[in-house]
Image (tube, coloured by chain):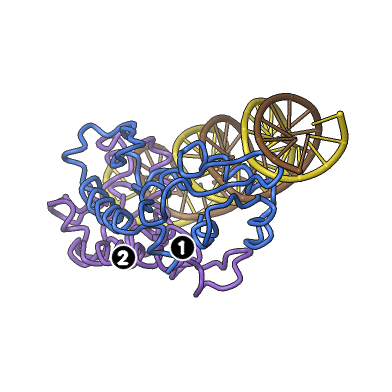
Chain colours: A blue, B purple, C brown, D yellow
Amino acid sequence: MTFMAKQESKIPVQIATIAEHENISQKYLESILLTLRKAGFLGSKKGKNGGYYLFKNPEDIRMTDVMRVLEGPIALVPCVSLNFYEKCADCPDENTCAVHNLMLEVRDNTLTIFNNKSLADIIS
Amino acid sequence: MTFMAKQESKIPVQIATIAEHENISQKYLESILLTLRKAGFLGSKKGKNGGYYLFKNPEDIRMTDVMRVLEGPIALVPCVSLNFYEKCADCPDENTCAVHNLMLEVRDNTLTIFNNKSLADIIS
DNA sequence: ACTTTATCCTATTAAGCCGATAGGCAAATA
DNA sequence: TATTTGCCTATCGGCTTAATAGGATAAAGT
């Protein structure tokens, strides 16, 4: 995504081009780009001169959203995750769990950082 | 560790006791306690009336250190980890990597939180 | 000394996750 | 209609880690 954000124009960039510049296997990159497209970050064009392009401006893409799609939960443990919440198997009460609040604090802090960074921010 | 920190006296607590209170398999708990002892957090006593006890006062146990031992790296990616550093396979230069700095910021922030919390803090 | 109680230790299993790959399909362009 | 390029599903292999098993070792009490 940083590669596409650095492009001047919005014409599609081919998988092969990105793969070469970023030192990634073309096939693996393909699966990543597919994920990003299904998540709504990228548009694609098939056939000759096809490729991928950013849907929104880099300034409007929050790193929080990118992280969730590519890296999964931002929380360190599922029981404090907003989007991937899972109750701890044998925890009787989250409110009295000593670790829970600590993890909440870390999550909120990380979230603040990611929310305040756009794709445009990190490539500059 | 929170269980032991809550004890009034420093007499050893048996694995079976903790396992029961915390809803963990005794055998699995055993392996965790062993890890904590080898890491220098816990002392142990064998034989009748044996068990585990905290080496230091809960106020003197930083969560950073506990986390590293139990959860591994605090950094979200190895290339910004202080204690478990690993260079990204195909990254030509960390200084120009857009993600690197962002991850550094998150790591420092998380680290600050963990450094400022002791075991005593989180059980209160 | 012996028995009981408890930790110590190594090895192993089982499951889930994820990077990575393979191979064919579908659509757009010229 | 041939070529180019993304679309899609399935799968493999390695790694990690929760969890278990079984016996060795040491301390305490009698």
Label 2: chain letter: B
Camera-side residue: A74 or B65? A74
Describe residue B85's horizontal placement relative to residue B12 as left or right: right
Q: Amino acid under label 1?
A: Val
SS for callout 1:
helix
Residue B123 position, x and y percent, is 16, 51
Characterize the local packing of mark 2: few (<14), some (14-19) or many (20 or more) Cα atoms within 10 angstroms. Answer: some
Residue highlighted by disc 2: B111
Is B90 drawn above or below residue C19 in the view shown?
Answer: below
Is D19 drawn above or below residue A2 in the view shown?
Answer: above
Residue C10 position, x and y percent, is 59, 52
Tag of residue B55 = none
Q: Are the residues under badges 1 and 2 in a single subunit?
A: yes
Q: CA distance from mark 1 to mark 2?
A: 18 Å
Residue B86 position, x and y percent, is 55, 66
Q: What residue sits 46% from the left and 38% below the top? A: A39
Q: What residue sits 28% from the left and 42% below the top? A: A80
Q: Is residue B42 visible?
A: no
Write down the quadrant of residue D22 in the picture: top right
Label 1: chain letter: B
Say how many tags the image has: 2
Q: Is residue A13 visible?
A: yes
Characterize the local packing of mark 1: few (<14), some (14-19) or many (20 or more) Cα atoms within 10 angstroms. Answer: some
Describe residue A88's horizontal placement relative to residue A70 as left or right: left
Camera-side residue: A57 or B40? A57
SS for callout 2:
helix
Residue B18 position, x and y percent, is 28, 41
Describe residue B26's horizontal placement relative to residue D1 as left or right: left
Residue highlighted by disc 1: B99
Is there CB contact under 8 Å for labels 1 and 2? no
